[in-house]
Amino acid sequence: MKVKLILIGLIIFSTALSAQNDAQFISQSTPTINPGESFDFSITFKNTGTKTWTAGDLYRLGSQAPHDNTIWQATNRIALPHDVAPGEEVTFTATLTAPSTEGVYVIQWRMVQDGVEWFGERSEIIPFINYSDPNTIFTYTTPTQGNIYDETMAAACLQGIINRDTPVVYELEGIGKHRPLHWLNIMTSDGRWLSNRPQIKLDCIEELYALAKDKINGAVIWDPNVAASMNVATTIAGVEDLVVLSPEYADEKLKEWGLQVKKDLRGLFTGDISGSAKNDAYRWAIENYLSQGLCSDHLLCLYEDPYFTRQAGDVGYVVTRDWAVKNRSFVYDLSPWGDEVPFDDEGQPVGTDLETYKMILDEVLKQTAGEKTTEVAGFFSFIKYSNVPGHPSSHDPVPTEWETVYLISPYNCYQNTVASSCYNQSFHSHAVVGDLKQHRPADTLQIEEGKTYICILMADYDSATPLYDFLVDYWPDPKRGELPLLWGINPNLVETYPDLISYYYETHSANDYFGADASAAGYMNPNRIKEEYLPLFIEHNKKFYNQLDMTISPMVLDWDQPTSAVKDAFTQFSPDGFATIVMDLHDTGGTSPEPQVWKGMPVTNLINVVGQISDIDAAANAMSNAIPQELPGTTSFYIFRIVWSWPNQVVDVINTLKNNRSDLDIKVVDPYNFFNLFKDHYDPSAIFDNKLAKDVTCTQNSNSGTLSILSDYIINKVEIYSVNGVVLKSVTSGFNSISTSNLKKNSMYLVKVYLDKGIAVKKIIK
């Protein structure tokens, strides 16, 4: 008997487990909706589960979008009119009242067994959009729970499409630093461009979709088995005005949004072509979209795909996709290295990523025909393509960054590196700003012999993330303005965040200055630009330097010292100063330039020994070690790079340096005076009346290794200087045969000729 009871209990328990709730949306009425007015509504669902729906078991219809709302009636439920057995349909009826308050609203319902679960399909949404001011801003907050990654992806597509021609949707951050709210508050205050624009809050993604619905042509589904397919899907979404959906999110949203699938990438990329499904995906997109001229030739997006990020819930390079979609950009994620396989695709033939990378760049160069430059927005994936803990590689992160720039520069491409978590680029980019003006120093300093002149570059605000996110922390420092600081920003970001750059210009102190970082209007290696494209390079930089009132390039990154052609190019837009960091990571014999003045432009090296300040004494010691123990009375010039640090830290470091180096007469100066004084020191022609130069002839005899100086005036003395101001030779006779055997070939020198009528200065290159 006991055994029989147990068996009966197990049968009942098993039956209970197998019984389940499910529902299918069948149809609904399509009412005419007017603000504040009531209307009759009916909706039909089918019981596709195995349990009978009864009122006694608390089966009802519940409101959605947003979940459990009471927008349309006082209660968030519609009662079940009768019991509904499995396989039967039921029609619910209710009188609803449209909200009178302006906004975007959605009618949507789903079955619920209260106290147990929500279940089955949601109904197809019925949008109700009611607003009168065309300048209204609609704010949408990224999700904090549920399918965060996939919903954020869909929202980015919707935002990019609806913001393509005018700024409409502004996305707020559900989890994080809330930078979007910070910038929205700034831009809606003090008469800035968003002041007095009404705002309407969107409470769910269905409301965002309702707002964008008329601009959306359908959906593209990516393949979770090929992470690169999400980047391909983003490219397609921009070109064809589609929403990118994962298969799981498509199952949830396609029917309720009334979307048709225009492209389904599942199973399309197998690796049969290149030996890599990842690269097959990109090569297919190159053939079908990029090479067809359907994508932007001015913007490529190097965005990390979901290989690692989706599982981790990292949406840093998902929220940026509004920018890619708005601009119809080609989106990719590839390694710049050709000597090892990437971590995300270890089965590919070595170098396949790099081959595909070059295919993209070749196609862009072909389409631009050398008449347009192209931005690469985004950064390589550290975890895939460089040596980080847990993921060994023969290439460290910094060399991988440099290799990317080395690779793209010959194609007239420049990088806006880190773009992660940069919200609302499709919105901010619409801000209209004219030519911006930064001040020049009130005092023009005269050189003081024996001084150690220091200029501080507050570096690495050259890409979207530091400008948008990091500088927010450092800019309010109460000690900003105590020392002259040169802030390095990327001038071409005025295309992405014009209002942010305008804000920094608007709020800078008399001791804040701006220079291009890095390397000019975009991060490239100038020496890698083909000589026939240097006129394009000059035109590109002139545009942005002029708009931002810049004349200094304090951080030019390259593999060798600038060639004569590159220096000539920079004189056209950066006449007030050029500083470089040379890293010859390819071991090609690259060297740093000697301090010099090239056709009126000061040229020197940026000293990269401090980085981000974490310890005041350590930073001061690093600077001190870069300044040798020089002879008393020696005049010297040092421009230091400091990364992502507070102005108060810089003040403390300089004070510590002065205390530690009593042998130095240190003076921190603004960049304009720094380079002007540098110019005076290294180019005597800048401080002498050189009208007599035309009356002096310098002739070099390469066979005898001599220099002949002739003039109609009496010559009293001749001095030969290096470009750094060191006297290499001084003679008081024999001016027609001065030995130059100690001078280095292919180097520039200054010849100071003391005449009875004055001093003449000539430049020679041995």
Image (cartoon, helix red, strand yellow):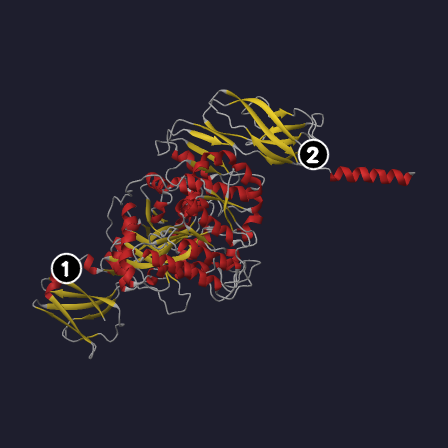
- Asked which quadrant contains residue 70, the reply is top right
Q: Residue 559 location in percent, x, y?
A: 37, 63
Q: Nearer the viewer, mark 2 or mark 1?
A: 2
**Residue farthest toward the right in the current orientation of the protein:** 1
The reply to whether residue 630 is in sight is: no
The residue that mark 2 highlights is: 86
Q: What amino acid type is highlighted by mark number 1?
A: Asn
Few, some or many residues within 10 Å of mark 2 (<14, 14–19, 20+)? some
Q: Name the spot of residue 645 as percent of width and height, x first.
A: 43, 48
Of helix, strand and loop, which one carries label 2? loop
Q: How many marks?
A: 2
Instruction: Say which quadrant the C terminus sits in.
Output: bottom left
- 764 above or below 422? below
* Location of the N terminus (image quadrant): top right
The one nearer the camera, 669 or 358, is 358
* Residue that numbered label 1 is attached to: 690
- The image quarter in which residue 721 lies: bottom left
Q: Residue furthest left?
A: 712
Secondary structure, mark 1, is loop
Quarter of the rendering containing residue 410: bottom left
Coordinates of residue 266 in the picture (x, y in percent): 54, 52
